[in-house]
Image (tube, rainbow, N blue to C red):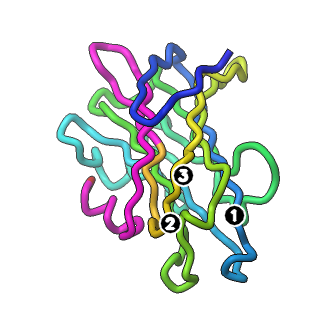
């Protein structure tokens, strides 16, 4: 049975291979335009910076060089039930420099489309065992992000040889560029 986390809670993952599923529903009627939400993954070293440019995983770079973090592709609409985008993680082959994996979701062209996360509902991040499909944990973002165009959904980090997940749920208005400036 999956554990439902609240913002700030942490949980051991206890699976060498797992998938992070991200989901959301957009209120397309509020702006008249379609929403394109994008998952991005910042694979960080001990210094809290991207190990190298190839360790920034997103729709134009779907995999780290060690193949331990793989983005399954960009969902341009968010239509349908279940996960809208997925990130597969294989800790068995992860580069030893990697200590943290940050999962961020941004709204593509948010400013020009006058869109923000206040117009997005039913947002969640979940972690499930890739081999068994058993859901390990889930975090539903229940906050109202009325002006934010980017949200850090969660992070996976290594502590004392164990990998853990933290439900973050922090938003900001400066989009993907802000996260790039923090982690590059």
Which residue is pictured at 45% across the width and 17% down the height?
12
Side (left or right) of 96 relative to 35: left
Distance from disc 2 to disc 1, alpha carbons, whole Å, reads 13 Å
Q: Element at badge 2?
A: loop
Residue 117 picture location, percent across and down: 54, 63
Side (left or right) of 97 relative to 163: left
Q: Is residue 157 magenta?
A: yes
Which residue is pictured at 54% across the width and 16% down the height?
15
Above/below status of 161 relative to 170: above
- The residue tagged 2 is 146
- Quarter of the picture holding the C terminus: bottom left
Question: Is residue 88 something that shows in the picture?
Answer: no
Q: Element at badge 3?
A: loop
Nearer to us: label 1 or label 3: 1
Q: Element at badge 1?
A: strand
Q: Residues within 10 Å of mark 3 (few under 14, many from 20)?
A: many
Distance from disc 2 to disc 3, alpha carbons, whole Å, reads 30 Å
- The residue tagged 3 is 62
Residue 49 picture location, percent across and down: 24, 47
Which residue is pictured at 46% across the width and 52% down the height?
104
Distance from disc 1 to disc 3, alpha carbons, whole Å, reads 24 Å
Residue 161 picture location, percent across and down: 32, 14
* Residue most extreme to the right: 80
Number of dots carrying numbers: 3
């Amino acid at each position: 049975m999956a554990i439902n986390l609240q913002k700030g809670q942490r949980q051991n993952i206890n699976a060498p291979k797992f998938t992070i599923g991200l989901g959301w529903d957009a209120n397309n009627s509020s702006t008249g335009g379609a929403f394109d939400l994008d998952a991005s993954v910042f694979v960080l070293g001990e210094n809290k910076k991207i190990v190298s440019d190839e360790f920034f995983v997103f729709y134009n770079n779907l995999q780290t060089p060690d193949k331990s973090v793989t983005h399954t592709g960009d969902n341009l609409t968010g239509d349908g039930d279940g996960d809208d985008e997925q990130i597969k993680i294989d800790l068995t082959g992860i580069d030893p420099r990697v200590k943290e994996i940050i999962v961020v979701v941004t709204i593509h062209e948010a400013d020009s489309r006058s869109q923000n996360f206040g117009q997005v509902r039913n947002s969640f991040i979940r972690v499930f065992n890739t081999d068994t499909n058993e859901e390990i944990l889930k975090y539903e973002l229940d906050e109202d992000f009325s002006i934010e165009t980017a949200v850090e959904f969660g992070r996976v980090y290594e502590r004392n040889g164990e990998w853990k997940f933290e439900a973050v749920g922090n938003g900001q208005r400066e989009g993907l560029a802000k996260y790039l400036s923090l982690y590059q």
